Amino acid sequence: MKKLVDDAVETGRTDIEAHVLADQTHLLRSAANIGIAQNRHRSSKLTKKHHALAWRLLDREGDYLRFTTDFSVPFDNNAAEREIRMIKVRQKVSGCLRTLTGAQTFCAIRSYLATAAKHGINYFASLTMLAERQPWLPVSA
């Protein structure tokens, strides 16, 4: 389905053909139903996870497939995971963020830098502007 969305975006279309999307959705449902059937006994921790995942795919199908109808929704959440990874690494490696104030300060700076980077402003330039009391601010819509 990701390839269908990528192809649609590449060719300038705003949606996927309904019958193609319906076929792919049917395949996903079939795969989830097979997963439920094959992991019904849930004899191990792994089969319990597989069973739960299959049920989530069916129960929250609209959430999982939103990227197929709204092209502004990303296929995965890797960008969000990358944003929080730095916090977890800092916490583990240096033992920082022991106080709420320190964590809030770190998150504010990290958020500012991430937003600037998404707008094409490099970290050093954005920090320099901030230190000079002329912070870069994104254009509001």
Image (tube, helix red, strand yellow):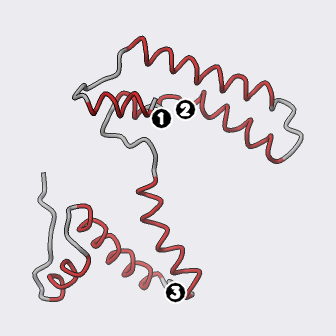
Left or right: 79 in relation to 64 = left
Of residues 7 and 80, the one nearer the viewer is: 7
Q: Could you say whether the residue bearing mark 1 is in a helix, strand or loop?
A: helix
Disc 3 marks which residue? 96
Look at 35% across and 34% down and name the residue there: 6
Determine the CA span between mark 2 and mark 3: 37 Å
Look at 20% across and 64% down and name the residue there: 120
Above-or-below relation of 58 to 113:
above
Disc 1 marks which residue? 63
Q: Where in the figure is residue 91, as x and y percent of width and height?
A: 54, 80
Q: Could you say whether the residue bearing mark 2 is in a helix, strand or loop?
A: loop
Quadrant in the picture for residue 80: bottom left
Of residues 7 and 74, the one nearer the viewer is: 7
Q: Where in the figure is residue 82, as x and y percent of width and height?
A: 45, 63
Q: Amino acid at mark 1?
A: Asp
Q: Where in the figure is residue 69, as x and y percent of width and height?
A: 36, 27
Determine the CA span between mark 1 and mark 2: 5 Å
Look at 80% across and 40% down and name the residue there: 47
Q: Amino acid at mark 2?
A: Arg
Left or right: 128 in relation to 88 = left
Disc 2 marks which residue? 60
Q: Where in the figure is residue 3, as x and y percent of width and height?
A: 42, 32
Q: Amino acid at mark 3?
A: Cys
